[in-house]
Image: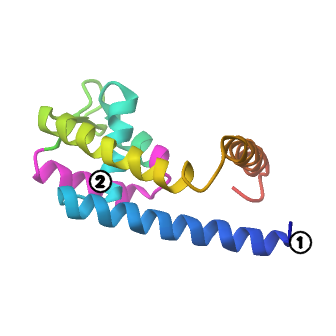
Amino acid sequence: MPNSSPVDTWERLVRFHRVATASMDERLRERFGHSLDDYDVLHQIAAHGEPIRMGELAARLLVANSSCNRIVGRLAAAELVERTRGAHDRREVFVDLTAEGQRLRRRMAAVHVRDIQRLLDTPLSTSQLALLDSALRDLLAGAEAAPDIT
């Protein structure tokens, strides 16, 4: 196996992420007219299982509140999500999927899962995938534990 510096590895990881997400975004836009960002919002709302506060949604997406508001606004205009005010604090905004948003998320998820499988299952053996998963878990835990990095 060739020697690799942490910087070389980092650059390959970033490049893989960019290439993979661009490919997945393009496929979702062509097939559904919605971006990977749109799918991520729909997925996070569905995964939450109930209406989610906008701030929490932005935190789950790892994006700024303004970016989250922009995407949710676009999805609300398409009647895929609905926003409601908090019952106890009218400043809180919650977002939930509409029935059409649920249907679209399921359809997009099927394509997205196939894309992920194509990107990871095809070139990697089961043992390589397990090793990659373990390494990424370690990296994520280390990054989250390092106060000067996050």
Tell me the chief SS of the magenta region. Answer: helix
Residue 88 higher or lower than 130, as above or below: above
Q: Position of residue 42 (x, y in %)?
A: 30, 43
Left or right of residue 140, residue 89 in this image: left
Residue at x 29% of width, y 24% of height:
88
Disc on res. 38: 2
Q: Position of residue 138 (x, y in %)?
A: 77, 44
* Three-letter amino acid code of the residue under disc 1: Asn
Q: Nearer the viewer, mark 2 or mark 1?
A: 1
**Residue 70 visible in the displayed image:** no
Q: Residue furthest right?
A: 3
Q: Secondary structure at mark 2?
A: helix
Left or right of residue 32, residue 71 in this image: right
Residue annotated with mark 1? 3
State the quadrant of the N terminus: bottom right
Which stretch did the figure color magenta? 59-79
Q: Secondary structure at mark 1?
A: loop
Q: CA–CA distance between discs 2 and 1?
A: 39 Å
Q: Position of residue 109 (x, y in %)?
A: 33, 42
Left or right of residue 17, residue 100 in this image: left
Residue at x 26% of width, y 41% of height:
105
Residue at x 18% of width, y 60% of height:
33
In the foreground, 82 or 29? 29
**Residue 112 visible in the displayed image:** yes
State the quadrant of the C terminus: bottom right
Q: Position of residue 53 (x, y in %)?
A: 35, 36
> Which of the marked residues, 2 or 1, is nearer the chain's N terminus?
1
In the foreground, 125 or 149? 125
Is 133 in the magenta?
no
Left or right of residue 145, residue 29 in this image: left
* Three-letter amino acid code of the residue under disc 2: Asp
